[in-house]
Amino acid sequence: QVQLVESGGGLVQAGGSLRLSCAASGRTSSNLNMGWFRQAPGKEREFVAYITWSSATYYADSVKGRFTISRDNAKNTGYLQMNSLKPEDTAVYYCAATNSVTYIYHFERAYNYWGQGTQVTVSS
């Protein structure tokens, strides 16, 4: 079993930045492919970004150019650097992971493991 713990959420003004972290622990946590999703109030959870074990990255169009996903394999930790934040980025952000190679990384069902979520609020 793998455990994921997010941190780094908070309140920020529009145009500001935050960096989210996702620490993985447990069995087989060292070769995970990791993704970030978010869920705004009253909306479905949506894909944000994905990074493979070898650090190939993919982004939702809505965050491309503003968010950067990265990882530190030695620390079993993934990161989501969020710049130029907008009020519409307000959501609970979830870290997700899978041991498998996946080409459907933008779908929730691609992931075996989920964190508890961290709130990001962007004020206008």
Image: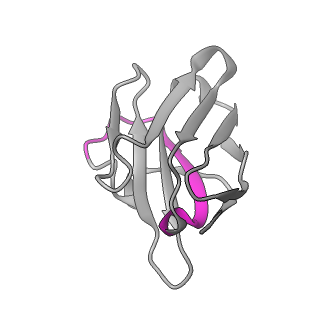
**Quarter the C terminus occupies:** bottom right
Query: At which x and y percent is residue 50?
Result: 40, 40
- Establish if 88 lies above or below 111: below
Q: How is the image coloured?
A: one colour
Which residues lie in the magenta part?
A: 88-103
Front in this rendered view, residue 95 or 87? 87
Q: Is residue 30 above or below residue 42?
A: above
Q: Is residue 32 visible?
A: no
Most distant residue in the top direction: 74
> Who's the residue at 44% across and 76% down the image?
44
| Residue for point 28% across, 52% down | 61
Query: Going by the image, does 92 lie left or right of 25?
Result: left
Image coordinates for residue 78, horizontal then vertical, percent? 59, 32
User: Is residue 94 within the magenta segment?
Assistant: yes
Vertical placement of residue 40 versus 36, above or below: below
Q: Residue furthest left?
A: 103
- For image coordinates 58% across by 18% down, the residue present is 73
Q: In the rendered view, does 92 fall on the left or right side of 39?
A: right
Left or right: residue 45 versus residue 94 is: left
Q: Nearer the viewer, residue 29 or 51?
A: 51
Decide: is 45 above or below 35.
below
- Identify which residue is drawn at 50% across, 28% down: 70
